Image (cartoon, rainbow, N blue to C red):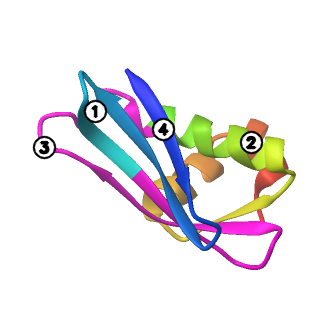
Amino acid sequence: MEVIVEDNGRKGRFALYIDASLVCEMTFVWSGSNKIIIDHTGIENGFNGKGYGNVLMAKAVEFARVKKIKILPLCPFAKSRFDKDPSISDVLF
């Protein structure tokens, strides 16, 4: 399993690969220089319920902490993770 961060300064994604195949992704757009908006999380058929979305969420939180930015979760999955896990609220916008 490998999680790749792609960021072109305007938008990007956290992508999880298994054996070089994309399993799931979480996309974001930059809003200014201090915030990203997570707008979509998608998981390929057959990979639901395995916790891969949580892996992407952890990578997004790590990304925000390293860059000292905040996350605005418009994606229902990302919003639900923030609602359920107060330990990541430090990066919530």
Asked if 11 appears above or below 48 in the picture, the reply is below
74 relative position to 87: left or right: left
> Which residue is depicted at the point 12% across and 35% down?
46
Residue 92 in the image, given as x and y percentages of width and height: 76, 58
1 or 4: tag closer to the N-terminus: 4
Nearer to us: label 4 or label 2? 4
C-alpha gap between disc 1 and disc 4: 21 Å
For label 2, the SS is helix
Residue occupied by mark 3: 45
88 relative position to 18: left or right: right
Residue occupied by mark 1: 49
Q: Quadrant of the C terminus?
A: bottom right
For label 3, the SS is loop
Dot 1 amino acid type: Gly
Q: Is 35 part of what is drawn in magenta?
A: yes
For label 1, the SS is loop
C-alpha gap between disc 4 and disc 3: 20 Å
Residue occupied by mark 2: 88
Asked if 88 appears above or below 9 in the picture, the reply is above
Furthest-left residue in this view: 46
C-alpha gap between disc 3 and disc 2: 28 Å
Nearer the observer, 45 or 32: 32
Range drawn in magenta: 26-53
Residue occupied by mark 4: 4
| Dots 3, 2 in contact, CB < 8 A | no
